Every structure is written in C-alpha cells, then in structure tokens.
Image: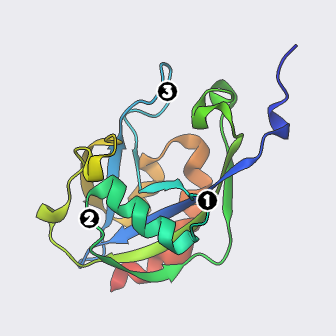
Amino acid sequence: MPRDFSKLPYRPCVGIVLFNATGLVWVGRRIAKWEGDVSPSLWQMPQGGIDENESPTQAAMRELEEETGTADAEIIGECPRWLRYDLPEEALGIGLKGKYRGQAQKWFAMRFLGGDDDINIDAPMGAKAEFDDWKWVPLEETVTRIVDFKRPIYQELVREFAQLAKG
C-alpha cells in the first residue's frame, strides 16, 4: 500500500538572503544528498532546520555559520510570512529524511560584514559540507539557479528583498 505523504508535516526551517557590500547575494552549489537527488548542480542560498527550543532568528545565525563558515553578518530584513514548498513526488519519502512533505521557511535578509576570505564551505563548524562551490550573484539570478520546486519561494524573496540589494 503506498504511503500517504500528504499527512506528513512541513519541516520548520529558516533561509538567509546574504547580501555583500555591493548588493550581490551568496549562493552555494549543493552536494547531492541521496542517489537521484535532482539538484546537485544547482545553487541555493543558506537554509536549514530550526532546532527544538531555538528561535527562527537564532536558527538563521546558526545556519549561516554552519553553511558558510561565518556569522559575520547582521539581520537587515525579515519576510513577514512563512513560505512553504512541497517536495517533488520523486523525492517524497527520501528527501528531508523521509519525515516531511516539504518545508515551511522563515526567511531573513542579512548584510555580510566580513570579507570573502572569511567564508569557508569545507565542513564549517565541524559539520558535513553542504556545498562544493560558492559565489556572489544578483538577487534576481538566484531564481534561475534554484531547483524548480523552490523557484516560487525565490521569486517571492526577490519581491520582498530587492530594495535591500541597493544598500
């Protein structure tokens, strides 16, 4: 009997739109997480789960450091709504450890206060590396770099945070 994935919850999560001094946004190229992962060559902004007894703001700062190797940033904006996506059918029961049907994400805009040499994606903070490359891109370009099923969220982030790219 097939599993009813519609009964699975959404994973509470945060995401970070990290702007540098010139208004470009940090993206990392994902490392495949499971065989058949549909997005290994695609780029995304830092994101991750909210731990028990952790606020979204605390989670955002922790995730930024875990994924980029630096927490040298300040929060300059917050999306007023939680944004949600569903995993594609082929990833249900596999992605997100099979526990969730997608993610409910609270997004923050941050200004990076450090230099490029402060970024370390090679197992930052002793965590398993999630990216094998990174770069700064215009905010609008993040939409074309993300996996299809997350594209509506990135489009919303462009609308929400575009004015922050100007500094």
Q: Position of residue 53 (x, y in %)?
A: 61, 66
Q: Mark 1 and mark 3 in contact (Cβ < 8 Å)? A: no
Q: Position of residue 145 (x, y in %)?
A: 42, 47
Residue receiving disc 3: 37
36 with respect to 99 (left or right): left
Disc assigned to residue 70: 2
The amino acid on which the numbered mark 1 sits, given as a three-letter code, is: Glu
What residue is drawn where x is 47% and y is 47%?
A: 146
Q: Which is nearer the eye, 134 or 123?
A: 123
Disc assigned to residue 52: 1
Residue 26, quarter of picture: bottom left
Q: CA distance from mark 3 to mark 1?
A: 27 Å
Please, is residue 62 above or below residue 132 in the view? below
Is residue 109 visible to us here? yes
What residue is drawn where x is 36% and y is 69%?
A: 18
SS at badge 2? loop
The amino acid on which the numbered mark 2 sits, given as a three-letter code, is: Thr
